[in-house]
Image: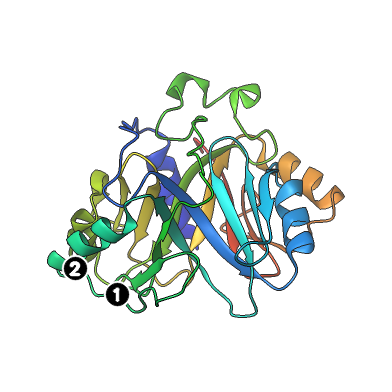
Amino acid sequence: MKKVFVAVALYSCMVLSSKGQSLLGDVACVYITTTDLDSSAAVYQKLGFEITGTNTFPSPWMQLSDGSLLIMLRKDPQPYIGLTYYSDAADSIAAKLEAAGIRFTQKPREGDAIWRYYFKTPDRFNIMLATNLGGFKQPRGLTMATMNPTDFSVDEKYPNRLCGVFGEFCHPVSNLDSTILYWTKLGFTVKYHTSSVYPHAILTDGLMIIGLHQTDHFNYPAITYFGKNIPEKTALLKQKGLTAFSESGGRYNQVLTTWEQQHFFIFSIGL
């Protein structure tokens, strides 16, 4: 995955704008199913996240945040990792997406406590729309979209002192240009795009930052954080009991795999 590291250096020079609005909803999160809520939550707490909500309706769930990124854990034996949007207008949003040619793989059924609309991008990346019965709020902490670039070199300025700053929820794509066209239908705007050396793009809708990487160096969605002093951060996380690390082009770029198979890229910035 050495080419992924090249993208990090390019991204570190960017300044993104964030409008705080989205076509897909009012709140965006990374959505992960788990068979053991407590065990999963413990992993993300060790990564600098705090539990911000929990309930047993309509099934047990926990919500965690580090102030910048929201993670939803739901107890469910069926493995699932994806991007979820919450809105009080999920039905009308779904109707607009269908009119734009988006095909849903699963729609709500009569009697469902929470209405969920599932669909996949051409690259099989999971996205869900759901009614916001929990009154969830979007975190407003700093991300790579809003952090002052002059603070990138100051470790104390990173919102998540254990991982750095949230940069992107990324996944590999087979054709970057056609995938970008698909994401623009979803209300995303391209903030960076290059087709040379390592084709990739960074997009945002004001709530989530998505990284599209035309590569065969990884084959899964990954939550990406950037920061300084990555070897020291990794050592501290290992002391906390997180050991499933591997290197991506050297010790300054680390990949952590949680037991639900969510991948975290914890990459050095500015190298």
Going by the image, does 198 lie left or right of 116? left
* Quarter-of-image position of residue 56: bottom right
**Residue 126's x, y, as percent?**
41, 69
166 vs 130: above or below? above
Up/down of 93 relative to 136, above or below: below
Residue named by callout 1:
104
- Say which label, 2 or 1, has the lower sequence index: 2
How far is disc 2 from disc 1 in space, using C-alphas? 8 Å
Element marked by disc 2: helix
Image quadrant where residue 199 sits: bottom left
Q: Residue furthest front?
A: 111
Residue drawn at 54 percent across, 49 percent down: 134
In the picture shown, does residue 90 fall above or below 135? below
Q: Amino acid at mark 1?
A: Phe
Residue 203 seen in this snapshot: yes
Q: Is residue 150 above or below residue 46?
A: above
Residue at position x 24%, y 50% from top? Answer: 194
Which residue sits furthest top?
150
Q: Is residue 126 visible?
A: no
The residue under label 2 is which amino acid type? Glu
Query: How many residues crowd mark 1 within 10 Å: few (<14), some (14–19), many (20+)?
Result: some
Q: Give the residue pinned by disc 2.
A: 98
Mark 2 vs 1: CB contact within 8 A:
yes
x and y, in percent, of residue 71 in the image: 58, 52
In this view, the residue in front, 135 or 97, is 135
Of residue 174 and residue 21, the one placed in the foreground of this image is 21
Which of these two is toward me, 185 or 216? 185
Q: Nearer the viewer, residue 34 or 166?
A: 34
SS at circle 1: loop
Few, some or many residues within 10 Å of mark 2 (<14, 14–19, 20+) = few
Query: Residue 130 location in percent, x, y?
Result: 42, 60
Q: In the image, 232: left or right of 31?
A: right
